[in-house]
Image (cartoon, rainbow, N blue to C red):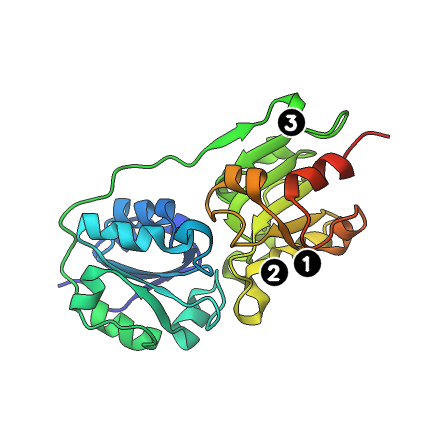
């Protein structure tokens, strides 16, 4: 007999052996990589944040892809509960996207997360797993950066940031919300600049709460609009992202809403 109580995780990157066979509610967005992690962990079913859905429906692409693994999955509307906060999603969340397996269990748009979790407890185990998917991490060539400026590293997930990124411009594909509301998880390096996806900003402006947390560490931080770049895709943020929010340290560097990210960075970080 499996544990019918849902497992609440601030991020799907926290999934471990305890997730196997369980219904998991995670604060992560419902993108492809997050879905692959849920599948790899052997979850019975999963609830994610829709992260505003965004460009190319990237915020829920994984929810729909889990059909291929036979896993019931759904997403909670970012406007109803805080992304990155599984407890709040359970308490306040309303369903915005359901895949075929979830539909068969009676999940529907607008349903309260608590009822959705109760229905997902009856989900059959998945019939397969999604193919493994690696998130990318790469340092751009010097020609991409401002002359004399810091190196630029693209990471699809903030979980890939390390101490070697100290002093670099770190462009992530991650949402800009504090994971589990923990300021210590805002960024794992003292970067020259941190870039996130605003995930639709959403309830309590949760999609950009890393920005003030990084301000306290003196790190400029910005978010790009979820409709301008695919969440979970740092290259999309770099190539297409448009600024939607900036903390005071970034404002002091000339950041303004509506600016293309790459053009602003090249102008703001030129060596004097």
Q: Are marks 2 and 1 in contact (CB under 8 Å)?
A: yes
Q: Residue at x 32, y 49 (%)?
A: 35
Q: Which residue position is annotated with label 1?
A: 212
- Between the C-alphas of marks 2 and 1, the distance is 6 Å
Query: How many circles with numbers are drawn on the protein?
Result: 3
User: Residue 170 location, x and y as percent?
Assistant: 61, 38
Q: Are marks 3 and 2 in contact (CB under 8 Å)?
A: no
Which of 10/229 is in front?
A: 229
User: Residue 167 location, x and y as percent?
Assistant: 70, 34
Q: Which residue position is annotated with label 2?
A: 209
* Residue 69 in the image: above or below residue 51: above
Query: How many neighbours does mark 2 have within 10 angstroms: few (below 14), some (14-19), or many (20 or more)?
Result: many
Q: Nearer the viewer, mark 1 or mark 3?
A: 3
Q: Earlier in the sequence, mark 3 or mark 2?
A: 3
Please state if 210 lies on the left or on the right of 202 as rendered: right
Which of 149/229 is in front?
A: 229
| SS assignment at label 3 | helix
Query: How many neighbours does mark 3 have within 10 angstroms: few (below 14), some (14-19), or many (20 or more)?
Result: few
Q: Earlier in the sequence, mark 1 or mark 3?
A: 3
> Which quadrant of the figure contains the N terminus?
bottom left
| SS assignment at label 1 | helix
Please state if 211 lies on the left or on the right of 57 as rendered: right
Residue 144's tag is: 3
- Between the C-alphas of marks 3 and 2, the distance is 28 Å
């Amino acid at each position: 007999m499996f544990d019918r109580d849902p497992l609440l995780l601030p991020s799907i990157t926290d999934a471990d052996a305890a997730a196997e066979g369980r219904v998991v509610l995670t604060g992560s967005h419902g993108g492809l990589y997050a879905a692959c992690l849920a599948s790899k962990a052997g979850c019975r079913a999963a609830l994610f944040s829709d992260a505003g859905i965004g460009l190319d429906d990237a915020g829920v692409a994984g929810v729909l892809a889990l059909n291929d693994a036979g896993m019931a999955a759904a997403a909670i509307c970012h406007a109803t509960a805080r992304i990155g906060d599984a407890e709040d999603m359970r308490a306040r969340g309303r369903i915005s996207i359901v895949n075929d397996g979830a539909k068969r269990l009676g999940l529907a748009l607008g349903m309260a997360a608590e009822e959705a979790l109760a229905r997902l407890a009856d989900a059959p185990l998945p019939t397969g797993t999604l193919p493994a998917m690696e998130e990318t991490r790469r340092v751009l060539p010097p020609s991409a950066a401002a002359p004399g400026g810091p190196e630029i590293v693209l990471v699809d997930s903030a979980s890939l940031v390390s101490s070697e990124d100290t002093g670099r411009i770190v462009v992530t594909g991650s949402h800009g919300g504090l994971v589990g509301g923990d300021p210590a998880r805002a960024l794992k390096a003292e970067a020259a600049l941190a870039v996130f996806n605003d995930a639709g900003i959403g309830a309590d402006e949760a999609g950009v709460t890393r920005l003030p947390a990084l301000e306290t560490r003196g790190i400029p931080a910005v978010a790009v609009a979820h409709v301008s770049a695919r969440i979970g895709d740092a290259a999309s943020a770099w190539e297409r992202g448009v600024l939607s929010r900036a903390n005071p340290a970034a404002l002091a560097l000339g950041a303004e809403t509506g600016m293309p990210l790459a053009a602003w960075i090249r102008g703001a970080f030129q060596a004097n």
